Image (tube, rainbow, N blue to C red):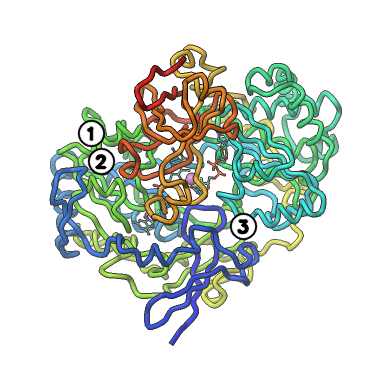
Amino acid sequence: MATTHKIVCPHDCPDTCVATVEVENGRAVKIGGDPDHPFTQGFLCAKVNQYLDRVYSKDRILHPLKRAGKKGEGKFEQISWDEALETIAANFKRVIAEYGPQSILPYSYAGNSGMIHYGSLDRRFFATLGASELERTICASAGFEGYKAVMGATIGFDPEKVENAKLIVAWGANIISSNVHFWPFVEAAKRKGARLIVIDPYRSKTAEKADWHIAPLPGTDGALAYAIMNVLFRDGLTDEEYISKYTVGVEGLKERALGWTPQKAAVETGLTVEIIEKLAREYGTTRPSAIRINYGLNRAAGGGNAVRIITCLPALVGDWRHVGGGIQLSSSGTYPAQVAALTRPDMIRPGTRTLNMTALGDALRPGLEPPVKALYVYNSNPAAIAPDQNAVRSGLGREDLFVAVHELFKTDTVDWADIVLPATTVLEHTDILKSYGHLYLAINQPAIAPLGECRSNAQVFRQLAEKMGLTDARLFESDEALMEQAFNWSHPRLQGINIERLKRETTVRLNVPAEWAPFAHGNFPTASGKCEFYSETEKAAGRDPLPNYVRPREGPVSNPKLAKTYPLAFISPPAHHFLNSTFSAQPVFMRREGGEPALTIHPDDARARGIVDGQMVRTFNDRGEFLAKAHVSDGARPGVVVGLSVWWAKLCPGGRNANAVTGQALTDLGNGATFYDVLVDVARHDGAAPSA
Ligand SMILES: Nc1nc2c(c(=O)[nH]1)N[C@H]1C(S)=C(S)[C@@H](COP(=O)(O)OP(=O)(O)OC[C@H]3O[C@@H](n4cnc5c(=O)[nH]c(N)nc54)[C@H](O)[C@@H]3O)O[C@H]1N2
Ligand SMILES: Nc1nc2c(c(=O)[nH]1)N[C@H]1C(S)=C(S)[C@@H](COP(=O)(O)OP(=O)(O)OC[C@H]3O[C@@H](n4cnc5c(=O)[nH]c(N)nc54)[C@H](O)[C@@H]3O)O[C@H]1N2
Ligand SMILES: [Mo]
């Protein structure tokens, strides 16, 4: 007999969709969108539409494995759970005895974004051992810090209300690929006459649909935003009443903005003065405007400040007065989450070191004191997604490093594992989820029993704790108990919402008004309660109290010396049919992405290198190289090459992907990754000289 269940997509995407799953005789047979979910509106993305192929894939890992070949070879034999857990515990104990607990390093990110399986018992377990802490900043931390410096928390306009906007600016945001359920709301606005401007060095799927596509050099958005402000102040386009009532520090901001004339910004951004003037006038004279800023522009040296500068704009023009106006980076700050109650940072031993996940290559290098001797990976595929891939691979290949990986598939990282543990999909476990792109809270309940011997993250950490002989009750709490701890249920935004109701209804909108203009009357969650152009909090932390443009580390304008050798800026944003490196080994999605990695290069840059469309090219710099098929197109602006990502390295020609050329350097704020701050050159793969 068929039953219908609802599940909640746990992937690292702002949309956090609800899907319906039909189950017959214990097997899921159909998946579809949930028409009752107001943000998802009954459709799923291209990837999750095919989710049952993932769940029931013949490639899924269904049993614990141990290495049966050389490290990196990917040869394994099946073992029991008991042997797998015993081996991990024995290695952890050995490492602790020989080198101390900080020689153990957990490595995880948001492969599963649910609150329980993203971070709860895992954090408590490693803290109890005294393992090195991991700074999880590979994605969003620069932008997050930049936004918070101005706004106090990541709260923005209600995405469902964006149809009120007369102008929508997608800034470093490829909505159609990475936030597709927001797109119908953009279209609704467009039908009512709104214009869409996309600011992106690459003509993304969203830029193709824009009324106007502006293509600056990567990492220069802060200069562009300051030049917009320059025109706003110069031409009297600011909302003086809103500014005086609800903001602090306009004088200092204005002084900096006046230094950024459109002329100066044109040189920095590679745009013309006319484009900048026109953009500024259009933004300055269209109310309300809605800026959908996203993480695409936070992956450069100045990513934090870029977001910080842009985030000042809506308050200058008074857009927060309007429902659907303002800016949105992430909605995550709207939820009264109690992350500390889940992860228990109070359990971390004082003095424990923190290693940055972006600099995994450095963390695994021999000679670090104390050395990393045991690595436990879950929810992540660092051999594919971490920058400076050659450094990461050298580290993972160290004979003296014990590696355990909890995964669903034989990823690049699994190839380096000594022990592999099989993980459940969202159809097989329980979780509670917030979103970073809308305002609904959701509970996921299993629709089917775990396949094979698969176990959830939380389940494995309970069992590892037991194997390690630990007895602290906080390491063994149930999923149910963790769900209760995940939120402050007495917060006004959760009024009328509890776990029982969520289990019944799957998803509930936070208790915010249907017509919500969060900052129409100030009430910013900052120290001053105002929008902070000038931040005492930043100053107290030893940083610039005002936003400050930080140039790309590897830009053609900002670093002419390096650009002499490597003249092209390289970005590797998300491919439409992949989600980071998830889905990237599913044949149907590989096919839809062209079967193999592509590098989009402007006809002028191709011609100068004797490169023709469809031929294999080498993209390289001092850190490494990867191969891809040239896609000669003006979809990439001159001076910029684009390799949509993240492919599994082992499935790429040459065995390396885009991260062979990206670096471990960190951003200005938030210690984030700088994936899109990279200079390279490109050459025909037949061995011809790099430049003509
Ligand atoms: N289909 C799909 N969806 C995804 C993902 C995926 O891999 N695939 N990944 C998920 C994750 S983890 C995240 S963090 C989000 C990421 O999604 P977004 O936050 O939208 O970020 P990106 O896709 O990295 O970049 C968006 C756009 O910014 C452009 N860009 C790159 N550098 C710059 C720059 O310096 N300035 C400007 N203005 N634009 C720039 C890129 O060309 C890209 O088109 O998407 C999530 N959703
Ligand atoms: N060149 C380049 N590199 C990038 C980016 C880019 O734009 N360009 N984007 C960066 C960004 S924004 C991000 S967020 C990172 C993302 O990097 P990661 O967080 O590593 O994300 P994925 O590559 O999707 O890998 C997640 C893995 O977790 C596994 N997984 C899923 N659910 C579970 C579970 O419940 N338990 C366990 N144990 N495993 C599970 C999946 O099978 C998958 O292999 O990549 C970054 N890397
Ligand atoms: Mo991300």
* In the image: residue 374, left or right of residue 493: left
Tag 1 residue: 370
What is the spatial separation of the Cα atoms under label 1 and label 2, in whole angstroms? 7 Å
Q: Can residue 411 be seen in this view?
A: yes
Between disc 3 and disc 2, the foreground one is 3
Quick check: marks 1 and 2 in contact, CB under 8 Å?
yes
Q: In the image, residue 389 lies at what x, y percent?
A: 33, 34
Tag 3 residue: 181
Q: Quadrant of ligand 1?
A: top right
Residue 309: name its quadrant: top right
In the displayed image of the protein, which residue is found farthest to the bottom? 1
Tag 2 residue: 102
Q: What element carries label 1?
A: loop
Q: In the image, residue 617 lies at what x, y percent?
A: 41, 29
Q: Which mark is residue 185?
A: none
Query: In the image, what residue type sits under mark 3?
Result: His
Count residues near mark 1 (Cα–Cα under 10 Å), then give few for <14, some for 14-19, many for 20+. some
User: Considering only vertical position in the picture, is 692 above or below 167?
Assistant: above
Task: Of the two numbered discs 3 and 1 on the same chain, state the one appearing first in sequence.
Answer: 3
Q: Nearer the viewer, residue 398 or 156?
A: 398
Residue 685: name its quadrant: top left
Residue displayed at 63% across by 23% down: 269
